[in-house]
């Protein structure tokens, strides 16, 4: 018969295998299958919406005259819900009633915070409210959710109070939350051994993983599926933070690799050192990868497989997002991914060879078959990586070689954002009807614009292309969704550090366009059409 973890821990304490302090991990919560808990939570969240509506309808006049009435109302709702949820044994139907009341009470109090306080202080207050509820309610799944909420609102408070709402500030806030989690996790596992802290930390780190994925942006192919063929790229970090972020990402990767090697002596092999080196190189290119790999290493070594799976999926997402980083040419990115794939194939071969059992006779057949199947899998994976990368390269190179060269005049941009370290903000003269159209108005359709090309190769984009036949001398160019609007291919031109003066004279963007309107920005031209 299958025994629960609580029973195993209790028996181990009784026989002296575990110390009495291990009793802090014994749960008094009734075990329920996770699908039941998930459906219960989903039903509660949906039920909280009409419950909030009923509360405000019944008390609307009072709340309109005195917003301070929100506090006692929310305290009543939260108090009743906490009293019910603190019971050791609770019917599922009663729990379904208590959870919406808790969510409604917490949401009401949060609304009061945002009415009476600044956004930053209100966000910090919501985070403290979430922690307080987690302390009062001994429900592990709810504590994970409240831990995630507390992390999200604390990060929001810091971003607001520090007025760091740009990409640089967001990176620092997420990694600051990562540092807090590392300290809390160490103290928890070495000294506290508290179920409450463990569950709060679980929700906290899951929010950090989600934040790192959000900061990274779209990943390979997913962005194309969502945006109908291409995805907007993410602006890079500014200097000197970019260098610090690369160093921190590499350091976290090496730290995670060293931790795994310390916990698992079997990894102390040359192939593992090569693995760490490859991941460190990728972490330098992707400043959000190091934190995710550190989380993955810590959770794998301690058997927290759920968090480890989330971190592994996030790492795959982040590595795929390299495809959309315009700081590196497409050919360079392809070579990086091909090289990394080839090295991982070599590492897998070395690991399989190093770990192959020494057997003889007929018993060697299964081992040989498994090794053969593994090698086939490695070969197929390597082939798929090479095929995908080279198809993308071939498409771009074909467009550069065979596409029609045209020039598009640059439109003015905010002078404060023209030069940003190693890239230049771009804006193009588009028809007014396109400039006034938001991305949401077009749905999944890709807009195209038509224009005429003069004898110098300069195209004047005059109208939105509606699919009608082009007039003589006209061409059509496909637009890219970007920041809620549209642009030609990209709104940034990247260059090496220290070359800003070279590109300040840019007046035209040089494109290659094929017969279907696919375009690629290949260079910049000056006022006299000279190449820069």
Image (spheres, rainbow, N blue to C red):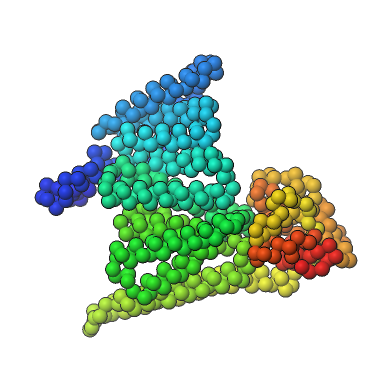
Q: Quadrant of the C terminus?
A: bottom right
In the image, taking residue 125 as reference, residue 458 lies left or right, namely right
**Residue in the picture at 54% in, 16% down:** 65
Please, which residue is most extreme toward the right here? 455
Nearer to us in this view, 500 or 317: 500
* Residue 353, horizontal then vertical, whole percent: 34, 78
Please, which residue is most extreme toward the left here? 15
Q: Please indicate, yes or no, whether residue 315 appears anywhere in the rendered image.
A: no
* Residue 453, horizontal then vertical, whole percent: 85, 62
**Residue in the picture at 19% in, 45% down:** 21
* Residue 438, horizontal then vertical, whole percent: 69, 45
Q: Quadrant of residue 523?
A: bottom right
In the image, taking residue 258 as reference, residue 532 lies left or right, namely right
Q: Please indicate, yes or no, whether residue 84 appears anywhere in the rendered image.
A: yes
The image shows a total of numbered marks equal to 0
Please, which residue is most extreme toward the bottom here? 361
Q: Quadrant of residue 105?
A: top left
**Residue in the picture at 55% in, 56% down:** 241
**Residue in the picture at 36% in, 75% down:** 270
Nearer to us in this view, 151 or 64: 151
* Residue 114, horizontal then vertical, whole percent: 52, 30
Task: Tell me: residue 374, above or below residue 209.
Answer: below
Nearer to us in this view, 511 or 273: 273
């Amino acid at each position: 018969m299958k025994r629960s973890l609580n029973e195993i821990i209790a028996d181990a304490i009784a026989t002296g295998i575990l110390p009495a302090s291990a009793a802090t991990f014994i749960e008094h919560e009734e075990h329920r299958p996770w699908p039941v808990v998930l459906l219960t939570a989903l039903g509660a969240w949906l039920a909280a919406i009409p419950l909030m509506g009923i509360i405000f309808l019944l008390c609307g006049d009072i709340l309109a005259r005195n917003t301070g009435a929100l506090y006692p109302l929310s305290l009543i709702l939260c108090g009743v819900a906490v009293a019910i949820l603190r019971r050791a044994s609770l019917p599922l139907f009663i729990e379904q009633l208590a959870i919406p009341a808790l969510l409604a009470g917490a949401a009401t109090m949060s609304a009061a915070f945002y009415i009476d306080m600044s956004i930053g202080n209100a966000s910090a207050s919501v985070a403290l409210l979430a922690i307080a509820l987690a302390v009062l309610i001994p429900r592990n799944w709810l504590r994970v959710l409240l831990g995630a909420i507390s992390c999200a609102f604390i990060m929001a408070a810091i971003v607001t109070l520090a007025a760091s709402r740009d990409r640089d500030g967001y990176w620092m806030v997420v990694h600051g939350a990562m540092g807090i989690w590392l300290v809390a996790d160490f103290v928890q596992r070495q000294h506290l051994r508290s179920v409450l802290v463990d569950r709060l930390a679980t929700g906290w780190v899951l929010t950090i993983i989600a934040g790192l994925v959000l900061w990274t942006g779209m990943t390979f192919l997913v962005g194309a599926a969502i945006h109908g063929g291409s995805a907007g790229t993410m602006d890079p970090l500014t200097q000197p933070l970019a260098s610090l972020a690369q160093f921190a990402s590499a350091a976290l990767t090496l730290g995670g690799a060293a931790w795994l090697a310390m916990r698992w002596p079997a990894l102390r092999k040359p192939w593992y050192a090569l693995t760490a080196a490859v991941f460190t190189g990728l972490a330098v290119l992707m400043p959000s990868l190091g934190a995710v790999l550190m989380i993955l290493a810590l959770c794998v070594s301690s058997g927290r497989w759920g968090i480890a799976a989330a971190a592994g999926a996030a790492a795959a997402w982040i590595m795929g997002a390299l495809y959309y980083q315009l700081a590196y040419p497409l050919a360079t990115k392809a070579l990086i991914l091909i090289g990394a794939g080839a090295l991982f194939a070599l590492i897998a071969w070395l690991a399989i060879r190093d770990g192959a059992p020494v057997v003889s006779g007929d018993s060697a057949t299964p081992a040989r078959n498994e090794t053969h199947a593994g090698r086939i899998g490695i070969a197929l994976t390597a082939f798929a990586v090479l095929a995908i990368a080279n198809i993308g390269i071939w498409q771009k190179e074909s467009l550069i070689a065979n596409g029609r060269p045209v020039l598009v005049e640059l439109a003015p941009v905010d002078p404060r954002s023209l030069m940003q370290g190693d890239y230049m903000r771009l804006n193009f003269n588009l028809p007014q009807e396109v400039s006034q159209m938001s991305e949401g108005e077009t749905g999944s359709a890709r807009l195209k614009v038509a224009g005429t090309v003069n004898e110098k190769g300069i195209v004047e984009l005059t109208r939105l292309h509606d699919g009608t036949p082009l007039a003589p001398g006209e061409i059509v160019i496909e637009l890219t969704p970007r920041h809620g609007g549209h642009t030609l291919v990209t709104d940034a031109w990247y260059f090496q550090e220290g070359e800003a003066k070279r590109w300040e004279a840019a007046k035209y963007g040089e494109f290659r366009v094929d017969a279907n309107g696919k375009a690629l920005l290949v260079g910049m031209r000056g006022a006299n059409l000279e190449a820069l």
